[in-house]
Amino acid sequence: MCMDILILMVIMLAIRMSTLLRDMIIHIHILLKISRLDYLFRIIGIFVFLLVEKVVRYVEERSGGVDSWGTIRPPVVV
């Protein structure tokens, strides 16, 4: 009788451990997907920053040294 209860407890523990392991694997998989998206958003952010920087430099070069207020600025040395 006591051995049956012990075997039953071991089986229940094994089932619980397998459920916890499955849940852990699912959470790890979700975290990996999120981290991939995080890297993708970082790359997109860098790309947008560089694109905006190029546009700003283009507009500065084409403005002829005059800003929106009409004052003459010294040329930008790069």
Image (cartoon, rainbow, N blue to C red):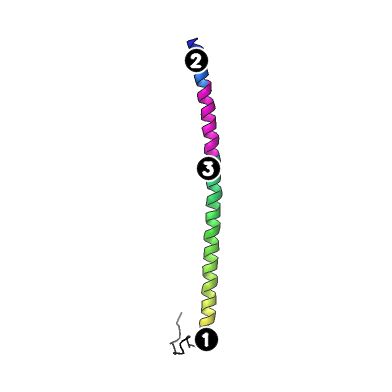
The x and y percentages for residue 5 are: 50, 15
Q: Please give the label number shown on residue 1.
A: none
Nearer the observer, disc 2 or disc 1? 2
User: Mark 1 or mark 3, which has the lower sequence index?
Assistant: 3
Amino acid type at mark 1: Ser
Query: Residue at 52% across / 46% down in the picture?
Result: 31
Name the one closer to the observer, 42 or 8: 8
Q: What residue is shown with label 1?
A: 63
Residue 51 drawn in magenta: no
Q: Dot 1 lies on which element? A: loop
The x and y percentages for residue 28 are: 53, 42
Residue 15 drawn in magenta: yes
Dominant secondary-structure state across the stretch colored magenta: helix
- What's the distance in space between the residues labelled 1 and 3, CA to CA? 52 Å
Q: What residue is shown with label 2?
A: 5
Q: Which residues are magenta?
A: 11-25
The x and y percentages for residue 53 are: 51, 73
Q: Dot 3 lies on which element? A: helix
The relative height of residue 23 versus residue 6 in the rendered view (above or below) is: below
